[in-house]
Image: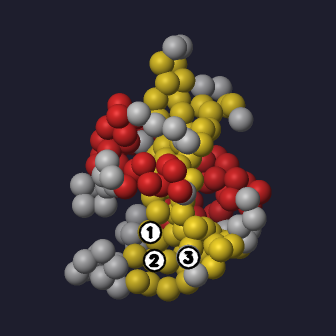
Amino acid sequence: MRDKNIFFEVIKNFDCSLIENIIELEKENLGPEAALNAWQIPVIIRYGKFITVMQENGKNKKIAGVCEAIRDWNDEHKAFIHSFYIIKEQRSKGIGRKLLEYAAGILRDEGFKSIELTVDPENMPALKLYKDFGFNLVKTEYNEYGRGKDRYLMSLKL
């Protein structure tokens, strides 16, 4: 699927430079506390879904956004989006919605019936994207990532 210089890619193979690039993107976009590390990223690539939106300029391509999903162990038809972000320079251009559409389509095609994710209650752009896409607030998870780090748990039926 291509749209101008943007295309989507499910990462299945990786090398050290890709992992290093993703680690930096994780830190920049999620913060150092929430960022995945060199041990966790290969696991999600191999055993989950690691979907990127890529930006291509001539011969150069770089990651413009990431959606990392895993299967829920308690419900094989439910996926959990561990991380979802668009790099700062590409935000507010509709790329997040396109990545979410692409990821939801892949998950639906693979037999998933629902998707869950958590989001910072103060992240208004992400909340708007998820609500506009059809996600519903399930509950507030208090102290989910430590004292005072609450998250909204949201769910989407596919």
Query: Given the image, on which type of amino acid does mark 3 rest?
Result: Trp
Q: Position of residue 143 (x, y in %)?
A: 30, 82
Q: Position of residue 99 (x, y in %)?
A: 60, 48
Q: Residue furthest top?
A: 58
Q: Position of residue 145 (x, y in %)?
A: 30, 74
Distance between the alpha carbons at the discs numbered 2 and 3? 20 Å
Residue under label 3, please give it: 73
Q: Nearer the viewer, mark 3 or mark 1?
A: 3
Label 2 environment density (alpha carbons within 10 Å; few <14, some 14–19, many ≥20)? many
Label 1 environment density (alpha carbons within 10 Å; few <14, some 14–19, many ≥20)? many
Q: Earlier in the sequence, mark 1 or mark 2?
A: 1
Return the residue nearer the eye: 64 or 45. 45
Q: Nearer the viewer, mark 2 or mark 3?
A: 3
Mark 2 and mark 3 in contact? Answer it, CB < 8 Å.
no
Whether residue 97 appears in this view of the structure is no
Whether residue 18 appears in this view of the structure is yes
- Res. 87 image quadrant: top left
Q: Give the number of the disc on residue 119.
A: 1
Distance between the alpha carbons at the discs numbered 3 and 1? 21 Å
Residue in view at x 60 percent, y 25 percent = 5
Mark 1 and mark 2 in contact? Answer it, CB < 8 Å.
yes
Query: Given the image, on which type of amino acid does mark 2 rest?
Result: Tyr
Return the residue nearer the eye: 8 or 131. 8
Query: Given the image, on which type of amino acid does mark 1 rest?
Result: Val
Q: Secondary structure at mark 2?
A: strand
Up-down relation of residue 57 to residue 77 (above or below): above
Residue in view at x 41 percent, y 33 percent = 15
Residue under label 2, please give it: 152
Q: Earlier in the sequence, mark 3 or mark 1?
A: 3
| Image quarter hosting the N terminus | top right
